[in-house]
């Protein structure tokens, strides 16, 4: 008998997790630059819904992509600050 594989956990509370920086970032530009997706797709992900209004969110791979994008943006901000 084959063991059942668990589905990867969907992260549906990303907006809450980004609360401290929510208003400081242009999420439209972020979605386009780091995900090559529309802002509406990204906002749905952030809100934990799918395109049809059902439950959705970030897959583990998308969450890792988000983490990397935030780290890249932090590095870019740090380099800009060091140029002052």
Image: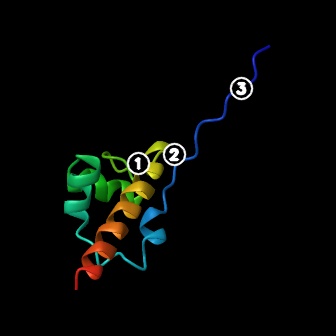
Q: Residue furthest bottom?
A: 84
Which quarter of the image is occupied by the N terminus?
top right
Q: Residue furthest front?
A: 83
Q: Is residue 19 left or right of residue 41?
A: right
Does residue 56 appear in the picture of this structure? no
What is the secondary structure assignment of the residue under circle 2?
helix
Colour convention: rainbow
Frontmost of labels 1 and 3 is 3
Q: Which residue is mark 3?
A: 4
Q: Residues within 10 Å of mark 3 (few under 14, many from 20)?
A: few
Q: Is residue 39 left or right of residue 1?
A: left
Q: Residue at x 41, y 67 (%)?
A: 15
Front-most of 74 and 60? 74
Q: Is residue 80 above or below residue 32?
A: below
Mark with earlier residue (2, 3)? 3
Q: Is residue 75 left or right of residue 67?
A: left
Q: Which residue is mark 2?
A: 60
Q: Which residue is mark 1?
A: 54
What is the secondary structure assignment of the residue under circle 3?
loop
Q: Is residue 78 above or below residue 42?
A: below
Which quarter of the image is occupied by the C terminus?
bottom left
Mark with earlier residue (1, 2)? 1
């Amino acid at each position: 008998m084959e063991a059942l594989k668990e589905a990867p956990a969907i992260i549906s509370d990303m907006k809450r997790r980004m609360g401290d920086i929510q208003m400081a970032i242009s999420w439209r530009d972020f979605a386009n630059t780091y995900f090559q997706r529309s802002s509406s797709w990204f906002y749905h992900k952030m809100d934990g819904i799918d395109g049809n209004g059902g439950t959705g969110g970030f897959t583990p791979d998308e969450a890792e992509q988000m983490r990397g994008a935030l780290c890249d943006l932090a590095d870019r901000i740090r380099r800009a600050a060091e140029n002052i």
